[in-house]
Structures are given as structure tokens and as C-alpha cells.
Image (cartoon, rainbow, N blue to C red):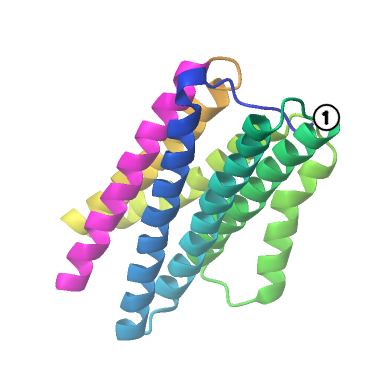
Amino acid sequence: MGGIYVIPQWFFSYDIVLNLIFGIITGVVSVASYKIYKLSLQRQSKLFSLAFLSISVSYLLQAFLIFVLFSKLSLQSTISFFSFTFWLNLTLYAHILFFLVGITTLAYMILGVRSMRVYILLSLITLAPFLITESKLYLFHLLSAVLLIYVLCHYILHFWEKKNKRNLFIMLAFGLFLLSQFFFMFSIKEGFYYIVGDVVSILAYLIMIVNLVTIRRT
């Protein structure tokens, strides 16, 4: 088993709804970024769109699979341990895979390298450790944090060079995005941090949408 979060029981139904909201918001970010790419033909906008498309899929899949799991629990008086762990692990691994592919795509975008081999290598380096560890949730958020630190440093330098509101928004969004990963790490032992991580995440995504809308209007 890859591990589970400690989530307050009353929060389960809200968590499914929040994952749907995250999926929709990140999907909107992806579509908005792609529209900017169609107007500007900037490669970074295209990769940004693909990155958030993958992150959107990770949330939507998680919401769907959690819904399936709890539907089985509510419809069946008993459920085998194998069936429960299968659906739980499928939910976890699907979310990890698509989320990390999204973050890895952001890091690849910032590298500025045009090489599929570099992208594949970066993805393999990111995903390979999951084959040899049982603490998959902790590793997931740790790797996400490391990649996001790299992404955040890029946007901090970008803001330092060109001080404007758009750069400030994107820097703040990725700063909150990074912060949420640390809360999720703590949530493996304490459920309160899971709720805080969700709140911080939704703030980060909303700031990204505001930033993209601002860019399209200018």
C-alpha cells in the first residue's frame, strides 16, 4: 500500500467536491494558457497548458475513483480488503502519476531545452523512486516540493528582473502551491493539515486564473 492521508471523517464528501473543483480550475488554467499560446505561439504557454492539463486530469481521476470507492462501500455491506486496497492504491497512483507529470513539465518548460529525451529522462528520474519505496505519499509531496522550489525560484528571479503585477501573481501562486505540499506531508499524520493544504491549493489556483485573465486582457 502506498499510504493514506489522515482526513477528518466529516471532510470525505467535501474532499470529492474539492477535487472536482481543483480539476475544473486547473482545466481552466490549461485552456486559458492554450488560448494565449494560440495568440502568441510562445512555447512556454503551450507547455504551461499541457502541465496544467495533466494536473487537472490527476484531480478529476482522483475525484472519480474516490467516488467509486465510497459508492462500493455504501452499496455493499462488506467489501474485501483486496478490493478496498486495489481501489485506494489505484486512486493514489493515478493522482501521483498525472500530478508529477504536470510538475515535471513545468520544470522542463523552465529549463528551456527542446529535447524529448531530456523530458523523458527528467520524468523517469522523478517517477522511478516510487518503485523502491513504501512511503509513496511522503515521497510524492517531497518530490513535488523540490520541483516546485525550482519553478518558484525561476519566477522569483523573473519578478526581480521585471517587477509587475503579473509576475507577482504567478510568483505568489507557485509560492502557495509549494506551501500546500508541506501541509499535505504533515497531513499523513494529522488530518487538520490536509484541510489547510486544500485551502492553500485553491487560493494558489485562483490566483493563477486571475493572472491568466489579466494577461489575456492586455
Q: Please indicate whether residue 146 sits to the left or right of residue 122 in the image.
A: left
Q: Which of 62 and 40 is in front in this view?
A: 62
Image quadrant where residue 39 sits = bottom left
Q: Please indicate whether residue 55 sits to the left or right of residue 213 in the image.
A: right
Where's the C terminus, which quadrant?
bottom left
Which residue occupies 59% across, 36% down?
A: 141
SS class, disc 1? loop
Q: Does residue 160 appear in this view? A: no
Which residue occupies 36% across, 61% down?
A: 29
Residue receiving disc 1 = 80
Q: Does residue 148 appear in this view? A: yes
Q: How crowded is mark 1: few (under 14 residues within 10 Å), some or many (20 or more)?
A: few
Q: Please indicate whether residue 209 sits to the left or right of residue 114 in the image.
A: left
Specify whether residue 169 is painted magenta: no
- Span shown in magenta: 191-217
Q: Position of residue 11 (x, y in %)?
A: 46, 25
Q: Which residue lies furthest to the top in this view?
A: 190
The total number of labels drawn is 1
Main secondary structure found in the magenta portion: helix
Q: Please indicate whether residue 90 sits to the left or right of residue 6 in the image.
A: right
Where 49 sits versus 8, above or below?
below
Q: Position of residue 42 (x, y in %)?
A: 38, 79
